[in-house]
Image (spheres, rainbow, N blue to C red):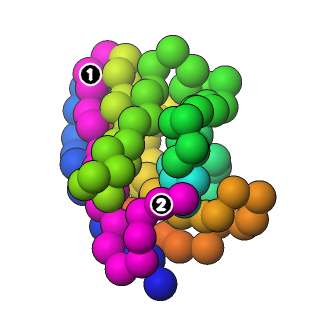
Amino acid sequence: QVHLVESGGGSVQAGGSLRLSCTASGRTFSPYTMGWFRQAPGKDREFVGHIMYTGGGTYYVDSVKGRFTITRDNAKSTVYLQMNSLKPEDTAVYYCAAKFPGRAYEYWGQGTQVTVSS
């Protein structure tokens, strides 16, 4: 079992930045792929991006490419989502999740609210 806790959400004006953190406890942090998702009011949950344990490779959806960066500190069992140039459409509850490579996401955090005002 992996327990994930997000933090760092809040309210910011358009063009601003926030950094979300997700700290894991329980089973070892490695070799999980860590993903970030978001869910806006009235919409389905959306995949934002992920970072792999091996090599630290990342992937982002087009809507956040060049603005969001995912990093991880395996020694601290923490993954980060740096969000720059935020837009009102980035407003959502953001979740981190963990999975073994090649499998579905199995562990989820409770979410943290990000609100971007215009």
Q: Nearer the viewer, mark 2 or mark 1?
A: 2
User: Dividing the image into 4 quarters, which one contains the C terminus?
Assistant: top left
- Are the residues at dot 2 and dot 1 in contact (C-beta closer than 8 Å)? no
Helix, strand or loop under label 2 = loop
Residue at x 43%, y 28% (from the top left corner): 69
Query: Measured from the top left, where is residue 105 in percent x and y?
Result: 64, 66
Apparent side of residue 41 relative to residue 47 in the rendered image (left or right)? left
Residue at x 27%, y 52% (from the top left corner): 75
Apparent side of residue 102 relative to residue 105 in the rendered image (left or right)? right
Residue 107 painted magenta: no
Identify which amino acid the numbered label 2 is placed on: Ser
Query: Measured from the top left, where is residue 66 in percent x and y?
Result: 51, 15
Vertical position of residue 9 compared to residue 58: above or below: below
Residue 41 in view here: no
Residue 24 painted magenta: yes
Residue at x 57%, y 53% (from the top left corner): 33
Q: How crowded is mark 1: few (under 14 residues within 10 Å), some or many (20 or more)?
A: some
Residue 30 disc label: 2
